[in-house]
Image (cartoon, grey):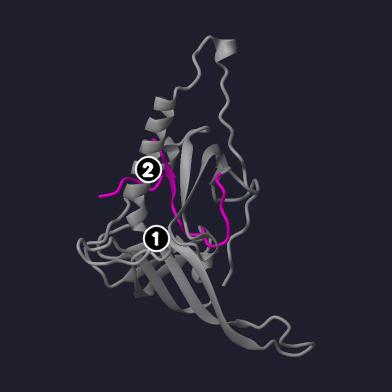
Amino acid sequence: MKRGMIRPLMLLALTSSGAASGQSAPRSADLGRLSLSLQSVVAKVGPAVVQVRVSGYGPVPGGATGGAALLGNQRSTGSGVVVSPDGFIITNAHVIQGGRRYIVVLPRPAVPGVPGRSALAPVSQEVSATVVGTDVETDLAILKVDQKNLPFARLGNSDSLTPGQVVLAFGSPFGLASSVTMGVVSAVGRQLRDEDRMIYIQTDTPINPGNSGGPLVSAVVWSWGSIR
């Protein structure tokens, strides 16, 4: 089981060019509306984002010298997004690679009138998942959980993205569930090699091990679609 690559942290700064362009500097009310807009996206997308816990067997580091490698229990975490109300979940293929048991952690809202857990331990539900299929070339996998009426995201059209759009990355970096980071679309239509059949979206959004499988969401045109 592999973990995602660590991306460098990019710091965003808000600057004003009002003196040069004649435009007024951003008002606090404008920033407040932007903040509320982003909070609204998080509130709608968050319930469809899940944590994926994978356990299986793999080589034990330093377990053998010159002989056959020793196998031991291995555990890793990744992210995923629910794409249908009956429990189909998209994640990355490398997140579940080598796994034998898959647990999906579903975020659950607290029941009104019933004491919930603290903010440090949000209410959630752990359920077993099965692998429906994987595609190594696109690094995608489909999981299925036996649940109904789940919040879900509809897939969007990434062709509508343009450089400069604000995007949010949802996931569980380093196992920290329900995390959100922000950046911009740096470029679209990227290829790592000329002969590569995969086309990528380049973004400066901070992404770390554990984010793999989580959705990248545009604040304008959601690349994973809207939430029902």
Residue in the foreground of this view, choosing between 109 and 199: 109
Indicate whether 17 appears above or below 98. Answer: above
> Which residue type carries mark 2?
Gln
Circle number at residue 136: none
Q: Does the magenta stretch include residue 222?
A: yes
Q: Residues within 10 Å of mark 2 (few under 14, many from 20)?
A: few
**Helix, strand or loop at disc 1?**
loop
For residue 59, what is the image quadrant?
A: bottom right
For residue 51, what is the image quadrant?
A: bottom left
Residue in the foreground of this view, choosing between 222 and 10: 10
> Which residue type carries mark 1?
Ala
Decide whether the magenta segment is chiefly helix, strand or loop.
loop
Circle number at residue 119: 1
Circle number at residue 39: 2
Residue 217, image x, y percentages? 42, 45
Q: How far apart are marks 2 and 1 (CA)?
A: 17 Å
